[in-house]
Every structure is written in structure tokens, then in C-alpha cells.
Image (cartoon, rainbow, N blue to C red):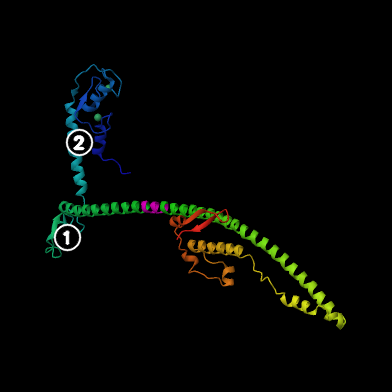
Amino acid sequence: MAALNPVQHLQDELTCSICCEVFQHPVILDCGHSFCRACITQCREEANAHVSCPQCRSPSSQNNFRPNWQLANVVEKAKQLNEQVAKGAEGEQVCEEHGEALKLFCEADQKLLCMICRESQTHRAHAVAPIQEAAEQYKDLIHTQLRILRGDREKLEEQKMNRSQEHQDYQEKSKTERQKIVSEFERLRQLMKEQECLLLARLDEPDRMIKKSQKETVTKLSQEISLLDSLIFEMEGKCQQPSSDFLQDIRSTLTRCMKRKLQHVVEMCPEGEKNRSDISEQNQKLKKMLGIPPSDLEKDRGEPQGSYSKENVAMDPDTAHCQLVLSEDRKSDHEALTVKS
Ligand SMILES: [Zn+2]
Ligand SMILES: [Zn+2]
Ligand SMILES: [Zn+2]
Ligand SMILES: [Zn+2]
């Protein structure tokens, strides 16, 4: 740290012990200590009574503080001295070539000049300004640039904030969208599960009908077969008989054989089969409406396929559900899925 010059030492001695600044309008107390008028007045107001000296604590009976004129004069002189010293410090720079004070600034060479430099061949034609004036001009330019830089900084700060806000908004939206998808698919799974149960339950009735008709058909066919068995047995026995016995009632026997026709062309219960195929058709319609692609099993069987693709499932969950209506199916007494058209 540079050593204090004598003027600075002097200023230290001229400092008020309350505000630690150089005295302003100093006043003196009975004890001989001095303070700024404003500082000691504030002390008295805070104490709300007769003030004691902040430096030595001795009580003071004064109501009006006496100005310390001598001290005020010394303070004034010290200030002037300080300014002169400061000016001297600034003017210390001298031209290395001519030993004169550098008081001018050459715009073209951006260089400090003394009066002799200014008259030289090199700078005679150059625009030259006093140092203070040139400094003021450049300060103006620098301040203009500072304003622009601060403005730009503010804009960038604003952009940064906006961008953060936008990102936050996006994250909120994305989160909401994800939650929506998850809950929609949860609803769809629930709905599909219900429809699966309904369709399976509806197959019970045709299953039962077909099972019953199958049993009846088998019984009927078995009866027919055993009737034919006894007729064949009788005919074969007849063929073994001697001619005289064989010819007995031969015409009526033959007529019985020929009159017999295969009477029953048995079909599988048509009503049950129709019910089953209705359910299958409904299943297909439901899948098509929901945009569900065909299973590998269906592809292998060559069942008709719509224009499905995994990437483009054309399903709008907001409206798809509205088309699915649960209704009472009177025929089967089951709740069944019907498709509005
Ligand atoms: Zn003071
Ligand atoms: Zn004192
Ligand atoms: Zn010079
Ligand atoms: Zn020059």
C-alpha cells in the first residue's frame, strides 16, 4: 500500500469521530471536542436530553452548539490543498522527448502530445483536442456502447426466462398427455374385458343347442343303423334258404327292401350354428371399429382383413366408446354387444 501523503494525514486529523468523514459545519463542545453539527444534533435527539460528549463522555449543558470557525477554515484549506495535489498527480505525465506536460490528444495517432509535439511535422496536420475534452468525447461513446450492451443483456435474460417457461409448459403438457393415454387405455382394457366376457357367455346358448341336437341325431342314426342291420341279416338268411323256402313271400320281402329309403339327411342344428356365426360376425365388427389388426391365426386362415397397420391405429377413444352399446338380447337372455349403424 502506498504511503499516505501529508495532505491525507492532515485530512485524517480533520475527521468527525461520529460519521468518520471530514467535518461539515463543525461545532465545539465544552470539553473541547468537535463534531459535525448534524452528527451531534442527531445524538442529542436520540438521547432526548442533554448530550454527553461521544468521545470523552463528559456532560454538556449546551442547548445551542457553538460553531468552531477555526476548524471550519482549516477543513476548507485542506480541501483546496487536496484538490491541488490531485490535479498535480494527473498532470505529472510529461513528454519523454520534450519534458513538457502532456496536455493534448492526437485523434489520428491516438496518442498524448505536449505543445512541442503538436507543432512538429508529424502532428501539425492532425486534429488535436485537450486531454479532458477528448476523454469526455470517448466517455460519451463508451456510455452509448454500455447502454446497448446492457439492453442486449436484458433481452437475452428475457429470452432465457421465456425459454425456461416454454420448456416448463411443454413438460406439463407432455405429462398430462401421458396420463391421458394411460387412463384411456386402462378404460379400453376394462371395456374389452367386459366385451370378452359377454361374447363368451353368448356362445353358451348355441353350444348347448348344438350339443342337444348332436345327441338326438346320433341316437336317431343309431336306430336307423340297427334297423338296417336286422334287415340285412334277414336278407342274408333268406339267400341261404333252399329255393322253395326262398321263394316264399319273396315279392313282399323285396318290396320292403325297395320301399326303404335313407329317410333322414341329417343337418347339424341350423339355429345353433346361426347364433354362433352371428357372434363371430359381431366380434369382427367390434375389432374393425376399434382398429385392432388381425391376429396371426386369422392371417393363416386367410380371413378377410381390413386396412390395418400397427402404426396407424385409427381409433378415437373419445368417440369409439359411444358406438358401443350394451343392450338386452331377448333371444338368448344375455347382455350382448350391438353395433350402431
Ligand atoms: Zn460528523
Ligand atoms: Zn469531549
Ligand atoms: Zn512532446
Ligand atoms: Zn498526430
Q: Identify which residue, 139 or 309, lies in the foreground.
A: 309
Say whether mark 1 is within 8 Å of ligand 4. yes
* In the displayed structure image, the side of residue 183 where residue 206 appears, left or right: right
Mark 2 neighbour class, 10 Å CA radius: few under 14, some 14 to 19, many 20 or more = some
Image quadrant assignment for residue 17: top left
Query: Can I make out residue 102 in this image?
Result: no
Residue 319 forms part of the magenta stretch: no
Label for residue 78?
A: 2
* In the displayed structure image, the side of residue 10 where residue 238 appears, left or right: right
Q: Quadrant of the N terminus?
A: top left
Q: Position of residue 308 (x, y in %)?
A: 49, 67
Q: Position of residue 100 (x, y in %)?
A: 16, 54
The three-letter amino acid code for the residue at tag 2 is: Ala
Q: Identify which residue, 153 or 250, lies in the foreground.
A: 250
Q: Identify which residue, 322 or 169, lies in the foreground.
A: 322
The three-letter amino acid code for the residue at tag 1 is: Glu
From the image, state whether disc 1 or disc 2 is nearer to you.
1
Instruction: Please give the residue where the numbered disc 1 appears in the rendered image.
Output: 107
Q: Identify which residue, 88 or 329, lies in the foreground.
A: 329
Is 181 situated above or below 125?
A: above
Residue 170 forms part of the magenta stretch: yes
